Image (tube, helix red, strand yellow):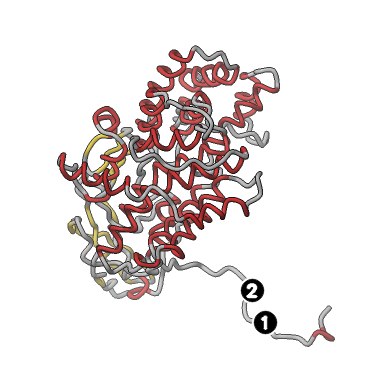
């Protein structure tokens, strides 16, 4: 038998990466050389972009759990070591030393701003906080019990009809205007969705307030009396927005990139990301977590019963707020949120059975062999829902606040994708498993 031949598969010029040898795949008697690409933190990837053209075969990876869709210079995370960095800066440093607007600038522009740059950025955002007056009328058309995420996604998508002067994805100035409009208007859009649900008048934004203070004022103030934002609430919300600002190629970020790859405008792409985030397995997990705690509380607060149910494969019960697709160590974001949670609850002296149940579940997760062996640590959703509840934010708004934080990351990825020399429209392949060719029968002959 003749020796297998070797065919190289050329590597595209992935930005920010370098070649690091080849891997070899043997298929149908031939050996194919697949380039190995290495990132700045030592991550390795097999570049199979030309695999189908060379061999006629594709890779199959349900849910993309082991597929890199792109290279990115925005966020680095190591799930085994519990590391999360934005543009190289540890999340712990950013949460302690920066505010959300500064972190948004870092993610979008790739560097920490100077004092003048940050002042200019804040000023620009303050000039765009109001939405078009006609858009306020949209809210009267939504049912009062509409989920705020449905409202927010719809209104963000509608921005492209009101701001047609900034839809050209190839015009840097138009893109920048859209970026600033989105960052400034999303808190207004989000707060209005809450006001609609409780039948209160919509509050105009106040540009003399900071980003989080302005949002909380629009959420809870009413025209007939003075309202003062609790600075501890604003600080806690700011931290939550920072830790949610980006998380690599997750479901909603990948959605924003995929929609944006068709050259859909930024408003449409972000609206798609909001829809993806709404799912209970993604951004909706913090809402699902609090609903689970309420269910346990309504059943007498028997934590052991539900922990035992979670261990049974056929019980149909899932313990929300534990474990993560990527992290196999303590989520660094959860550590930060837990510290803020403890501080806030101590200050408020809240006696709520839901908080007691959460603390009992936390103790179980850190001591029970079942959770330890499976590395099911409390995650970011577990603690964030508890904080939101303590602040008086209703459970249906939890995912909306997640979207507010993640907006900066979505924008950063959308821009990075458009600047990439390897950009192409996303078009995954599939392995067809349906019927082979069948003969079409007239309706009179079908049985």
Nearer the observer, 313 or 379: 379
Q: Residue 93's x, y, as percent?
A: 24, 30
Tell me whether the residue at label 1 lies in contact with that at label 2, contact meaning CB atoms closer than 8 angstroms.
yes
- Residue beneath the point at 36% across and 36% down: 243
Q: Residue 21's x, y, as percent?
A: 19, 58
Q: Which circle marks residue 435 in the picture?
A: 2
Nearer the observer, 279 or 11: 279
Placement of 127 over or under 393, stated as above or below: below
How many residues crowd mark 2 within 10 Å: few (<14), some (14–19), many (20+)? few
How many residues crowd mark 1 within 10 Å: few (<14), some (14–19), many (20+)? few
Residue at image mark 1: 438
Q: Quadrant of the N terminus?
A: bottom left
Placement of 371 over or under 359, stated as above or below: below
Q: Secondary structure at mark 1?
A: loop
Q: Is residue 302 left or right of residue 224?
A: right
- Residue beneath the point at 46% across and 39% down: 401
Nearer the observer, 50 or 232: 232
Disc 1 from disc 2: Cα separation: 8 Å
Placement of 361 over or under 106, stated as above or below: above
Q: Residue 432's x, y, as percent?
A: 55, 70
Q: Is residue 440 left or right of residue 431?
A: right
Q: Which circle marks residue 390 in the picture?
A: none
């Amino acid at each position: 038998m003749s020796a297998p031949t070797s065919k190289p598969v050329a590597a595209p010029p992935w930005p920010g990466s370098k070649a690091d040898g080849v891997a070899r795949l043997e298929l149908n008697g031939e050996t194919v050389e697949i380039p190995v690409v290495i990132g700045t933190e030592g991550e390795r990837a097999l570049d199979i972009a030309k695999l189908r053209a060379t061999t006629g075969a594709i890779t199959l990876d349900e849910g993309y759990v082991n597929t890199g869709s792109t290279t990115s210079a925005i966020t680095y995370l190591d799930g085994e070591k519990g590391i999360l960095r934005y543009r190289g800066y540890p999340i712990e440093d950013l949460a302690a030393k920066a505010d959300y607007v500064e972190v948004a600038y870092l993610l979008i522009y790739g560097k920490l701003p100077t004092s003048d740059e940050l002042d200019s950025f804040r000023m620009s955002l303050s000039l765009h906080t109001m939405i078009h007056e006609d858009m306020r009328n949209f809210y009267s058309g939504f049912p009062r019990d509409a989920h705020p995420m449905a409202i927010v996604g719809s209104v963000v998508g509608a921005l492209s009809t009101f701001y047609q002067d900034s839809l050209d994805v190839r015009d840097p100035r138009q893109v920048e205007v859209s970026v600033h409009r989105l960052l400034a208007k999303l808190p207004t859009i989000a707060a209005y969705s809450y006001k609609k649900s409780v039948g209160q008048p919509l509050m105009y934004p106040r540009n003399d307030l900071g980003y989080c203070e302005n949002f909380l004022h629009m959420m809870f103030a009413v025209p007939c009396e003075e309202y003062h934002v609790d600075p501890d609430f604003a600080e806690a919300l700011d931290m939550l927005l920072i830790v949610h600002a980006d998380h690599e190629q997750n479901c909603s970020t990948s959605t924003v990139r995929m929609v944006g790859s068709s050259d859909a405008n930024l408003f449409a792409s972000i609206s798609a990301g909001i829809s993806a985030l709404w799912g209970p397995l993604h951004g909706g997990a913090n809402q699902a977590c609090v609903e689970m705690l309420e269910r346990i509380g309504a059943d007498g607060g028997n934590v052991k019963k539900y922990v035992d149910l979670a261990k049974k494969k056929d019980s149909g019960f899932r313990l929300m707020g534990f474990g993560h697709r990527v992290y196999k160590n303590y989520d660094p974001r959860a550590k930060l949120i837990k510290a803020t949670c403890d501080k806030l609850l101590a200050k408020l002296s809240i006696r709520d059975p839901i908080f007691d149940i959460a603390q009992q579940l936390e103790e179980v997760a850190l001591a029970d062999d079942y959770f330890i062996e499976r590395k099911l640590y409390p995650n970011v959703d577990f603690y964030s829902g508890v904080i939101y509840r303590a602040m008086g934010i209703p459970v249906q708004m939890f995912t909306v606040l997640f979207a507010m934080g993640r907006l900066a990351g979505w924008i950063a990825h959308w821009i990075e994708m458009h600047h990439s020399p390897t950009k192409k429209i996303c078009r995954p392949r599939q392995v067809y498993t349906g019927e082979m060719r069948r003969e079409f029968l007239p309706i009179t002959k079908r049985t």
